[in-house]
Protein backbone atom coordinates (compact mmCIF):
# COMPACT_ATOMS: atom_id res chain seq x y z
CA UNK A 1 0.00 0.00 0.00
CA UNK A 2 1.24 3.52 -0.79
CA UNK A 3 2.54 5.61 2.07
CA UNK A 4 -0.09 8.39 2.40
CA UNK A 5 2.79 10.86 2.68
CA UNK A 6 3.53 10.27 -1.00
CA UNK A 7 0.01 11.25 -2.04
CA UNK A 8 -0.59 14.83 -3.19
CA UNK A 9 -3.67 17.02 -2.69
CA UNK A 10 -5.24 15.62 -5.84
CA UNK A 11 -4.87 11.99 -4.82
CA UNK A 12 -1.93 11.30 -7.13
CA UNK A 13 0.74 8.89 -5.85
CA UNK A 14 4.16 10.37 -6.42
CA UNK A 15 6.26 7.25 -6.76
CA UNK A 16 8.74 8.37 -9.40
CA UNK A 17 11.73 10.73 -9.20
CA UNK A 18 13.56 12.13 -12.20
CA UNK A 19 17.04 12.87 -10.98
CA UNK A 20 19.09 15.39 -12.94
CA UNK A 21 22.75 14.62 -12.30
CA UNK A 22 23.93 17.60 -14.36
CA UNK A 23 22.46 20.53 -16.26
CA UNK A 24 25.35 20.36 -18.76
CA UNK A 25 25.27 18.64 -22.12
CA UNK A 26 27.60 17.85 -25.00
CA UNK A 27 24.81 18.64 -27.52
CA UNK A 28 22.82 21.81 -28.19
CA UNK A 29 19.37 20.65 -29.37
CA UNK A 30 17.90 23.90 -30.61
CA UNK A 31 14.64 23.37 -28.66
CA UNK A 32 16.53 22.77 -25.41
CA UNK A 33 19.87 24.56 -24.75
CA UNK A 34 20.73 27.75 -26.65
CA UNK A 35 24.00 27.80 -28.60
CA UNK A 36 26.66 29.68 -26.66
CA UNK A 37 24.85 29.17 -23.34
CA UNK A 38 27.35 29.03 -20.46
CA UNK A 39 25.30 29.84 -17.36
CA UNK A 40 25.43 26.31 -15.93
CA UNK A 41 25.41 25.44 -12.24
CA UNK A 42 28.89 25.67 -10.74
CA UNK A 43 30.29 22.41 -9.28
CA UNK A 44 30.09 23.73 -5.70
CA UNK A 45 26.29 23.83 -6.14
CA UNK A 46 26.05 20.25 -7.44
CA UNK A 47 24.73 17.63 -5.07
CA UNK A 48 27.56 15.21 -4.31
CA UNK A 49 26.99 11.48 -4.84
CA UNK A 50 26.68 11.07 -1.05
CA UNK A 51 23.99 13.78 -0.94
CA UNK A 52 22.12 12.26 -3.88
CA UNK A 53 22.15 8.78 -2.35
CA UNK A 54 20.95 10.20 0.97
CA UNK A 55 18.03 12.12 -0.59
CA UNK A 56 16.98 9.29 -2.89
CA UNK A 57 17.27 6.90 0.06
CA UNK A 58 14.73 9.05 1.92
CA UNK A 59 12.44 9.16 -1.12
CA UNK A 60 12.56 5.36 -1.36
CA UNK A 61 11.89 4.90 2.36
CA UNK A 62 8.81 7.07 1.82
CA UNK A 63 7.72 4.72 -0.99
CA UNK A 64 9.32 5.98 -4.21
CA UNK A 65 9.87 2.93 -6.35
CA UNK A 66 11.37 4.33 -9.53
CA UNK A 67 14.21 6.71 -10.33
CA UNK A 68 15.37 7.89 -13.75
CA UNK A 69 18.81 9.45 -14.23
CA UNK A 70 18.58 12.41 -16.56
CA UNK A 71 19.92 15.92 -17.14
CA UNK A 72 21.25 17.80 -19.16
CA UNK A 73 23.17 14.85 -20.41
CA UNK A 74 23.72 12.43 -17.52
CA UNK A 75 26.69 10.72 -19.19
CA UNK A 76 28.77 13.90 -18.93
CA UNK A 77 28.72 13.61 -15.11
CA UNK A 78 31.96 11.85 -14.17
CA UNK A 79 31.58 8.59 -12.28
CA UNK A 80 27.93 7.99 -13.30
CA UNK A 81 28.27 4.17 -13.14
CA UNK A 82 29.43 4.50 -9.52
CA UNK A 83 26.38 6.60 -8.64
CA UNK A 84 24.12 4.16 -10.50
CA UNK A 85 25.57 1.24 -8.56
CA UNK A 86 24.93 2.99 -5.23
CA UNK A 87 21.37 3.90 -6.18
CA UNK A 88 20.59 0.43 -7.56
CA UNK A 89 21.64 -1.00 -4.20
CA UNK A 90 18.99 1.00 -2.28
CA UNK A 91 16.73 -1.70 -0.81
CA UNK A 92 13.33 -0.23 -1.74
CA UNK A 93 14.17 0.96 -5.24
CA UNK A 94 12.56 -1.28 -7.86
CA UNK A 95 13.56 0.44 -11.08
CA UNK A 96 16.57 2.58 -12.04
CA UNK A 97 16.55 3.88 -15.61
CA UNK A 98 18.39 6.41 -17.75
CA UNK A 99 17.57 9.06 -20.36
CA UNK A 100 20.51 9.93 -22.59
CA UNK A 101 21.52 11.37 -25.95
CA UNK A 102 23.77 8.27 -26.35
CA UNK A 103 26.82 10.16 -27.65
CA UNK A 104 28.96 8.49 -24.97
CA UNK A 105 27.12 5.18 -24.70
CA UNK A 106 29.73 3.29 -26.74
CA UNK A 107 32.06 3.73 -23.79
CA UNK A 108 29.53 3.64 -20.96
CA UNK A 109 26.84 1.12 -21.94
CA UNK A 110 28.52 -1.90 -20.32
CA UNK A 111 29.58 -0.15 -17.08
CA UNK A 112 26.06 1.26 -16.67
CA UNK A 113 24.43 -2.11 -17.31
CA UNK A 114 26.83 -3.73 -14.82
CA UNK A 115 25.89 -1.01 -12.32
CA UNK A 116 22.25 -2.13 -12.43
CA UNK A 117 20.50 0.05 -15.02
CA UNK A 118 18.31 -2.04 -17.35
CA UNK A 119 16.02 0.41 -19.15
CA UNK A 120 17.19 3.35 -21.25
CA UNK A 121 15.59 6.07 -23.32
CA UNK A 122 17.60 7.63 -26.13
CA UNK A 123 16.81 10.87 -27.96
CA UNK A 124 16.93 10.55 -31.74
CA UNK A 125 15.30 13.27 -33.83
CA UNK A 126 16.70 12.37 -37.25
CA UNK A 127 18.45 9.59 -39.13
CA UNK A 128 19.94 12.05 -41.59
CA UNK A 129 23.44 13.02 -40.40
CA UNK A 130 23.31 16.61 -41.70
CA UNK A 131 19.88 17.21 -40.29
CA UNK A 132 20.82 15.59 -37.00
CA UNK A 133 23.79 17.98 -36.78
CA UNK A 134 21.52 20.95 -37.54
CA UNK A 135 19.06 19.99 -34.80
CA UNK A 136 21.56 18.95 -32.11
CA UNK A 137 25.00 20.23 -33.14
CA UNK A 138 26.29 16.65 -32.76
CA UNK A 139 27.25 13.48 -34.61
CA UNK A 140 24.60 10.94 -35.61
CA UNK A 141 27.29 8.28 -36.06
CA UNK A 142 28.22 8.51 -32.37
CA UNK A 143 24.58 8.12 -31.32
CA UNK A 144 24.02 5.10 -33.58
CA UNK A 145 27.23 3.53 -32.24
CA UNK A 146 25.97 4.22 -28.71
CA UNK A 147 22.66 2.54 -29.50
CA UNK A 148 24.47 -0.50 -30.92
CA UNK A 149 26.53 -0.71 -27.73
CA UNK A 150 23.37 -0.46 -25.61
CA UNK A 151 21.78 -3.34 -27.52
CA UNK A 152 24.94 -5.39 -27.19
CA UNK A 153 25.13 -4.69 -23.44
CA UNK A 154 21.60 -6.08 -22.99
CA UNK A 155 19.44 -3.05 -22.12
CA UNK A 156 15.74 -3.79 -22.51
CA UNK A 157 13.59 -2.05 -23.40
CA UNK A 158 15.49 0.57 -25.37
CA UNK A 159 13.12 3.43 -26.12
CA UNK A 160 13.77 6.06 -28.78
CA UNK A 161 12.42 9.55 -28.08
CA UNK A 162 11.75 11.75 -31.10
CA UNK A 163 10.58 15.34 -30.73
CA UNK A 164 8.47 15.77 -33.86
CA UNK A 165 8.68 19.23 -35.44
CA UNK A 166 6.85 20.49 -38.49
CA UNK A 167 9.18 21.44 -41.33
CA UNK A 168 12.18 20.05 -39.44
CA UNK A 169 11.80 16.28 -39.09
CA UNK A 170 8.09 15.45 -39.51
CA UNK A 171 8.91 13.79 -42.85
CA UNK A 172 11.02 11.22 -40.97
CA UNK A 173 8.51 9.61 -38.62
CA UNK A 174 8.09 6.58 -40.93
CA UNK A 175 11.88 6.18 -41.38
CA UNK A 176 12.45 6.28 -37.64
CA UNK A 177 9.61 3.80 -37.11
CA UNK A 178 11.19 1.42 -39.66
CA UNK A 179 14.54 1.81 -37.90
CA UNK A 180 12.88 0.92 -34.57
CA UNK A 181 11.09 -2.08 -36.08
CA UNK A 182 14.43 -3.29 -37.50
CA UNK A 183 16.21 -2.90 -34.14
CA UNK A 184 13.26 -3.85 -31.92
CA UNK A 185 13.26 -0.50 -30.15
CA UNK A 186 10.14 1.13 -28.70
CA UNK A 187 9.47 4.51 -30.30
CA UNK A 188 7.95 7.52 -28.56
CA UNK A 189 6.99 10.73 -30.30
CA UNK A 190 7.00 13.92 -28.19
CA UNK A 191 5.29 17.26 -28.71
CA UNK A 192 7.45 20.38 -28.30
CA UNK A 193 6.98 22.15 -24.98
CA UNK A 194 7.46 25.91 -24.45
CA UNK A 195 10.24 25.70 -21.88
CA UNK A 196 12.65 28.63 -21.93
CA UNK A 197 13.24 30.81 -25.00
CA UNK A 198 14.40 27.72 -26.94
CA UNK A 199 11.26 25.71 -26.26
CA UNK A 200 9.12 28.78 -27.00
CA UNK A 201 10.80 29.20 -30.41
CA UNK A 202 10.34 25.50 -31.12
CA UNK A 203 6.58 26.01 -30.73
CA UNK A 204 6.73 27.53 -34.24
CA UNK A 205 7.27 23.93 -35.37
CA UNK A 206 4.69 22.36 -33.04
CA UNK A 207 2.66 19.45 -34.41
CA UNK A 208 -0.34 17.92 -32.69
CA UNK A 209 0.67 14.25 -32.52
CA UNK A 210 -2.89 13.14 -33.32
CA UNK A 211 -2.01 14.16 -36.87
CA UNK A 212 1.08 11.90 -36.87
CA UNK A 213 -0.94 9.06 -35.36
CA UNK A 214 -3.57 9.29 -38.11
CA UNK A 215 -0.83 9.37 -40.76
CA UNK A 216 0.92 6.28 -39.35
CA UNK A 217 -2.37 4.45 -38.90
CA UNK A 218 -2.99 4.70 -42.65
CA UNK A 219 0.29 2.98 -43.50
CA UNK A 220 0.71 0.67 -40.48
CA UNK A 221 -2.32 -0.46 -38.52
CA UNK A 222 -1.90 0.81 -34.93
CA UNK A 223 -3.52 -1.34 -32.24
CA UNK A 224 -4.02 0.33 -28.83
CA UNK A 225 -1.70 -1.24 -26.26
CA UNK A 226 0.00 -0.55 -22.96
CA UNK A 227 3.55 -0.78 -21.71
CA UNK A 228 4.72 -1.25 -18.14
CA UNK A 229 6.29 1.82 -16.60
CA UNK A 230 3.40 4.12 -15.76
CA UNK A 231 4.69 6.96 -17.95
CA UNK A 232 2.72 9.58 -19.85
CA UNK A 233 2.90 7.94 -23.31
CA UNK A 234 -0.25 6.50 -24.89
CA UNK A 235 0.88 3.39 -26.73
CA UNK A 236 -0.15 1.51 -29.83
CA UNK A 237 1.38 -1.66 -31.24
CA UNK A 238 2.33 -1.70 -34.89
CA UNK A 239 0.26 -4.51 -36.40
CA UNK A 240 2.32 -7.52 -37.46
CA UNK A 241 5.24 -6.52 -35.21
CA UNK A 242 5.99 -6.54 -31.50
CA UNK A 243 6.94 -2.84 -31.65
CA UNK A 244 5.10 -0.26 -29.57
CA UNK A 245 4.79 3.38 -30.56
CA UNK A 246 4.05 5.92 -27.84
CA UNK A 247 2.60 9.41 -28.18
CA UNK A 248 3.59 11.91 -25.48
CA UNK A 249 1.16 14.78 -25.84
CA UNK A 250 1.67 17.35 -23.05
CA UNK A 251 0.10 20.07 -25.23
CA UNK A 252 -2.70 18.45 -27.26
CA UNK A 253 -3.89 16.03 -24.54
CA UNK A 254 -2.22 16.76 -21.23
CA UNK A 255 -1.86 13.93 -18.75
CA UNK A 256 -1.50 15.96 -15.54
CA UNK A 257 -4.25 14.04 -13.74
CA UNK A 258 -2.10 10.90 -13.83
CA UNK A 259 1.26 12.59 -13.19
CA UNK A 260 3.22 10.46 -10.72
CA UNK A 261 6.58 12.24 -10.57
CA UNK A 262 8.72 15.01 -9.18
CA UNK A 263 12.11 16.18 -10.38
CA UNK A 264 15.29 16.74 -8.39
CA UNK A 265 17.75 19.08 -10.11
CA UNK A 266 21.54 18.96 -9.85
CA UNK A 267 21.54 21.80 -7.30
CA UNK A 268 19.19 19.87 -5.02
CA UNK A 269 15.92 21.62 -5.87
CA UNK A 270 12.67 19.65 -6.07
CA UNK A 271 10.50 20.73 -9.00
CA UNK A 272 7.01 19.38 -8.60
CA UNK A 273 5.80 20.22 -12.14
CA UNK A 274 7.69 20.70 -15.42
CA UNK A 275 5.28 23.43 -16.43
CA UNK A 276 5.15 25.42 -13.19
CA UNK A 277 7.65 27.44 -11.18
CA UNK A 278 6.96 25.70 -7.85
CA UNK A 279 10.24 24.51 -6.37
CA UNK A 280 11.63 23.46 -3.00
CA UNK A 281 15.37 23.75 -2.29
CA UNK A 282 16.76 20.80 -0.34
CA UNK A 283 20.44 21.80 -0.62
CA UNK A 284 20.41 24.30 2.28
CA UNK A 285 19.02 21.58 4.56
CA UNK A 286 21.58 19.05 3.33
CA UNK A 287 24.42 21.52 3.90
CA UNK A 288 23.17 22.31 7.42
CA UNK A 289 23.31 18.56 7.97
CA UNK A 290 19.75 18.34 9.27
CA UNK A 291 18.31 14.97 10.32
CA UNK A 292 16.70 12.52 7.89
CA UNK A 293 13.34 13.24 9.58
CA UNK A 294 13.69 16.93 8.71
CA UNK A 295 14.54 16.11 5.07
CA UNK A 296 11.59 13.72 4.96
CA UNK A 297 9.29 16.52 6.16
CA UNK A 298 10.63 18.84 3.45
CA UNK A 299 10.01 16.22 0.74
CA UNK A 300 6.50 15.50 2.01
CA UNK A 301 5.71 19.25 2.08
CA UNK A 302 6.98 19.64 -1.50
CA UNK A 303 4.84 16.72 -2.70
CA UNK A 304 1.77 17.97 -0.88
CA UNK A 305 2.00 21.24 -2.82
CA UNK A 306 2.37 19.74 -6.28
CA UNK A 307 0.26 21.89 -8.65
CA UNK A 308 -2.79 20.37 -10.30
CA UNK A 309 -1.55 20.91 -13.86
CA UNK A 310 0.78 22.81 -16.15
CA UNK A 311 -0.14 25.99 -18.01
CA UNK A 312 1.95 25.52 -21.16
CA UNK A 313 -1.04 26.28 -23.35
CA UNK A 314 -2.73 29.17 -21.51
CA UNK A 315 0.54 30.90 -20.42
CA UNK A 316 3.12 29.70 -23.00
CA UNK A 317 6.03 31.98 -21.98
CA UNK A 318 5.70 31.31 -18.25
CA UNK A 319 8.56 28.84 -17.81
CA UNK A 320 11.89 30.54 -18.45
CA UNK A 321 14.12 27.60 -17.49
CA UNK A 322 15.13 25.16 -20.23
CA UNK A 323 14.18 21.50 -20.06
CA UNK A 324 17.84 20.64 -19.38
CA UNK A 325 17.83 22.74 -16.20
CA UNK A 326 15.01 20.84 -14.52
CA UNK A 327 15.86 17.37 -15.75
CA UNK A 328 13.75 16.34 -18.74
C1 LIG B 1 16.28 17.30 -21.45
S1 LIG B 1 16.63 15.74 -22.19
C2 LIG B 1 17.69 15.01 -20.96
C3 LIG B 1 18.21 13.66 -21.29
C4 LIG B 1 19.12 13.54 -22.52
N1 LIG B 1 20.04 14.59 -22.66
C5 LIG B 1 18.28 13.36 -23.77
O1 LIG B 1 18.32 14.21 -24.64
O2 LIG B 1 17.59 12.33 -23.84
C6 LIG B 1 15.14 14.77 -21.95
C7 LIG B 1 14.12 14.85 -23.05
O3 LIG B 1 13.60 16.17 -23.10
C8 LIG B 1 13.28 16.45 -24.45
N2 LIG B 1 13.16 17.92 -24.60
C9 LIG B 1 14.05 18.89 -24.33
N3 LIG B 1 13.53 20.11 -24.57
C10 LIG B 1 12.27 19.91 -25.01
C11 LIG B 1 11.19 20.77 -25.42
N4 LIG B 1 11.32 22.09 -25.42
N5 LIG B 1 10.03 20.19 -25.78
C12 LIG B 1 9.87 18.84 -25.78
N6 LIG B 1 10.83 17.97 -25.39
C13 LIG B 1 12.02 18.50 -25.02
C14 LIG B 1 14.43 15.84 -25.21
O4 LIG B 1 14.14 15.62 -26.55
C15 LIG B 1 14.65 14.55 -24.46
O5 LIG B 1 13.87 13.51 -25.02
S1 LIG C 1 17.59 17.45 -25.24
FE1 LIG C 1 19.12 16.28 -24.11
S2 LIG C 1 20.76 16.08 -25.64
FE2 LIG C 1 19.52 17.73 -26.40
S3 LIG C 1 20.47 19.61 -25.56
FE3 LIG C 1 18.83 18.97 -24.15
S4 LIG C 1 19.87 17.81 -22.61
FE4 LIG C 1 21.23 17.90 -24.40
Image (tube, helix red, strand yellow):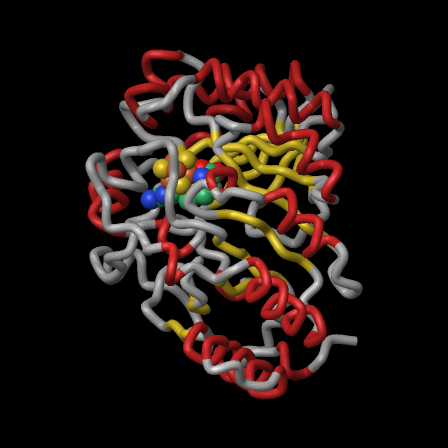
Residue 324: percent from left, percent from top: 37, 48
Q: Is 263 or 212 nearer to us in this picture?
A: 263
Residue for point 36% across, 72% down: 278
Q: Nearer the viewer, residue 218 or 248?
A: 248
Q: Position of residue 319 (x, y in %)?
A: 27, 59
Q: Is residue 307 above or below residue 126?
A: below
Position of residue 216 in the picture relative to residue 182 (left or right):
left
Quarter of image, res 121: top right
- As rendered, which of 216 and 309 lies closer to the eye? 309
Q: Is residue 213 visible?
A: no
Say above or below: 138 vs 284: above
Left or right of 36: which side holds 245?
right
Which of the 4 image quadrants contains residue 45? bottom left
Q: Is residue 124 left or right of residue 81?
A: left
- In the rendered image, which quarter is residue 53 located in? bottom right
| Residue 207 in view, yes or no | yes
User: For the image shown, how many numbered marks are present on the structure?
Assistant: 0
Q: Using the image as rendered, state which of residue 255 and residue 154 is in the foreground.
A: 154
The image quadrant where one finds the N terminus is: bottom right
Q: Residue at x 61, y 61 (%)?
A: 16
State which image quarter holds ligand 1.
top left
| Residue 31 percent across, percent down from the top left | 29, 38
Q: Position of residue 125 (x, y in %)?
A: 42, 26
Q: Residue at x 23, y 44 (%)?
A: 38
Q: Residue at x 59, y 63 (%)?
A: 50
Amino acid sequence: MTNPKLQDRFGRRIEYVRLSVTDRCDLRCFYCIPEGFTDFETPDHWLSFDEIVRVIGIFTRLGTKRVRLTGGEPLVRKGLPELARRLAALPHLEDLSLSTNATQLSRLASPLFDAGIRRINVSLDSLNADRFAQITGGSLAKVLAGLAAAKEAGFSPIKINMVVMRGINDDEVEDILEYCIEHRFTLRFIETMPMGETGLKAQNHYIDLQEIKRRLDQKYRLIPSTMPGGGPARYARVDGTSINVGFITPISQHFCETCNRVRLSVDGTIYTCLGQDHSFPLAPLLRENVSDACLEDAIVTAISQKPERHHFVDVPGQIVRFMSQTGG
